Image (tube, rainbow, N blue to C red):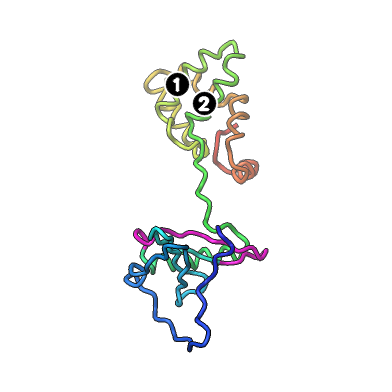
Amino acid sequence: MDEHETLPMPIAGTRRQRRKKLTDLMVAELKPNKRKRYFHPDPELPCHGVRVLPNGQKSFYVVIRDPWKKQRWIKLGNTAELKIEKARDKAREVIDRIKQGKSAFEPPPVKPDSVEDVVNDWLARHASSLRSGDEVGRVLKRHVLPVWRDRPFVEIGRSDISNLLDAVEDNHGPWVADSVGRITKCRGLVRHAARHLPTALRRQNGKGQEGGPPT
């Protein structure tokens, strides 16, 4: 963002008047300067206002210096899509985060790997080196993925495995259930799958709490 863009200053020799409250209607009526962009402050909330471009596009911004004295221009949204009260709410959150030295917005949560992601990754990396690799892949794809395919891997616990094995035994017999049980508890698969656990969950599992594959 342009650090040389400044806020409007009162004209010399004129008496400063108290600004009116900025409303959505007033924002809509802000006219562009065809020669340069400008920033119209929000008198109700310091560091917040509207940036108007020469082409008429208007957006709500927070203009603030972070704890390291660097000026930040943070876009909140287009005025055509965001009402000013909502913009003020977002601005307050952003201002508070910047003052604390954080990023302007909460980072989006990281999508956890699904069971299918973990299984496919393990098969691609290790199945070919196993004499029973083809059989392991067949069992996982036939009996495990149809049940857990899209579930986050970190949510699979001991009770889930017990329920799965019970269902396999009821539908395919105890021998198949034993085969599925051996594969789901395979140490190589468990060690590989553990790499997909967030650090916090690894610590929890180390303390005996349920979450992730049992060993």
194 sits to left or right of 17: right
| Residue drawn at the location 40% of the way across and 61% of the way down | 58
59 sits to left or right of 94: left
When the figure is inspected, residue 57 is found, relative to residue 202, above or below; the finding is below
Q: Which mark is residue 192?
A: none
Please say if the residues under marks 2 and 1 sit with CB atoms less than 8 Å apart: yes
SS at mark 1?
A: helix
SS at mark 2?
A: helix
Outermost residue, top side: 131
Q: Quadrant of residue 127?
A: top right
| Residue 69 belongs to the span the image colors magenta | yes
From which residue to which does the magenta span run? 64-82
120 sits to left or right of 188: left
Mark before the other along the chain sequence, 2 or 1: 2
Outermost residue, right side: 68
Q: Nearer the viewer, residue 71 or 145?
A: 71
Q: Amino acid at mark 1?
A: Lys
Q: Which residue is mark 2?
A: 119
